[in-house]
Amino acid sequence: MIIPFFKKIQGSPKGFRLANTVFFFLSGFGYSSWASRIPHIKAQLHLSEAEFGAVLFAFPIGLMLTMPFTGKLLNKYSSRSCMLLGAIMFNIVLSLPGFSAFVWQLVLILLIFGASRNILNLSMNAQALEVQKLYSKSIMTRFHAVWSLAGFAGAGLGYVMVTQHIAPSYHLLGISIFLMAVTACFYPLTKYTEPVPQQKKFFSMPDKNLVKFALICFVSMACENTMYDWSGIYFQNILHASPKLTTAAFVFFMTAVTAGRFLGDYAVTRFGIKNILFYSGIFITLGFLICFVLPYIYPTIFGYVLIGIGVSCVVPLVFSIAGNSKSLSSGSALTSISTIGYLGFLIVPPMVGFISEFLSMKWAFLVMSLLGAIMILMVNKIGEDE
């Protein structure tokens, strides 16, 4: 049944869309599986907040160091080939964090993990932009919605693994094997596109019309990744919640992100990009502020939901705008705008650890609410025609 179905849709818009959707699912499921075990791995290595914050620097550093390299790859090879490379690297390295016995091992793993996620993320978004061209209506936020749905599924499975006392090593190894099989099954359905060689610098900034969107992307990525890295630890250290409640809170966050992205295309059509970005900043600001002012379990879960809604549509909308750049190819535009956006991954979440060490994680979350306010100010600078 499956093979005839694959043959029927291979080479069609439906097949391309399905394959790209699966790769978004693969990325979200794998990353969320890792995120759901962060508190356990931190405890396993006996690290303080500041120490773990320093270790977390490795992931965005690996991501940022390979950003220009990925842009070159996308200009030289088809996005489907780059996507395969990124998926294989991502699947292999995902199996390793639970086996790290020393801090240096986790640092090395996170460096490679960041590099692989960068290659996979940019190439599957470039592939998504090519698939989008085959449809008259917007489908971009739905790809990211599937990423979030996969994140929800990964977090849910992580909850089961925690309650059943399954070690992170076995949990993540099993996920790695499963995702490698998924990659092999669906790669043949992906869309081949001719690369667009460009005589560009090894590193290029977004053109001036995209800079403000890149900065908005910076804030959203910083807030979203802070939730991935620290939401569970906030529940443990500030609220003294049980492991079950800690994982459940992350599931609520991912549910909000997923719902926001599934409704994103409809919301953009009805209200416009600027309004969606403006209210995203409002939700992010209020969410972190509630966590600071009302550090109790249920208000904090509500704050997590607001943050999830706030960050849900920002990145797919910004990537969609980047793909329409007149001066850069899709690959180059995504790379240049992501360079600024992913600095949010590099700078902010690890800083949460340092602020938490010397003040409190509550104050770190207050700083995040201020970032949301800055995003609101930047959105107000966007012209009505954009």
Image (spheres, grey):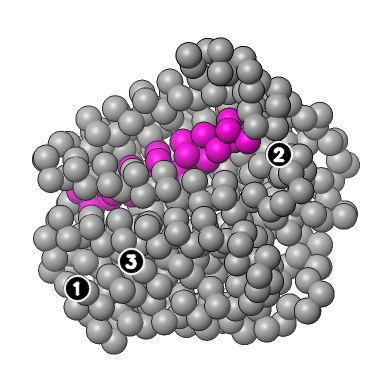
Q: Locate residue 83, reporting x and y percent.
A: 60, 32
User: Is 311 located above or below residue 44 in the figure?
Assistant: below
Label 1 residue SS: helix
Residue placed most toward the observer, 137 or 366: 137
Q: Hey, what amino acid is under mark 2?
A: Val
Q: Which disc is residue 353 wearing? A: 3
* 322 within the magenta span: no
Q: Which disc is residue 146 wearing? A: none
Residue placed most toward the observer, 294 or 47: 294
Q: Which picture quadrant has residue 289?
A: bottom left
Q: Hey, what amino acid is under mark 3?
A: Gly
Mark closer to the observer (3, 1): 1
Q: Locate residue 93, reporting x and y percent.
A: 41, 32
Q: Are marks 3 and 1 in contact (CB under 8 Å)?
A: no
Q: Which residue is mark 1?
A: 297
Residue placed most toward the observer, 347 or 235: 235
Q: Is residue 45 left or right of residue 351?
A: left
User: Is 44 located above or below residue 305 in the figure?
Assistant: above
Mark closer to the observer (2, 1): 2
Q: Is residue 186 left or right of residue 151?
A: right
Q: Which disc is residue 131 wearing? A: 2
Count residues near mark 1 (Cα–Cα under 10 Å), then give few for <14, some for 14-19, many for 20+: some
- The residue sitting at 57% across, 43% down in the picture is 121
Q: Is residue 365 left or right of residue 70?
A: left
Q: Hey, what amino acid is under mark 1?
A: Ile
Q: Locate residue 33, reporting x and y percent.
A: 33, 42
User: Is 83 located above or below residue 365 in the figure?
Assistant: above
Q: Which picture quadrant has residue 198?
A: top right
Q: Quadrant of the C terminus?
A: bottom right
Q: Is residue 258 visible?
A: yes
The part of the chain drawn in magenta is: 17-41
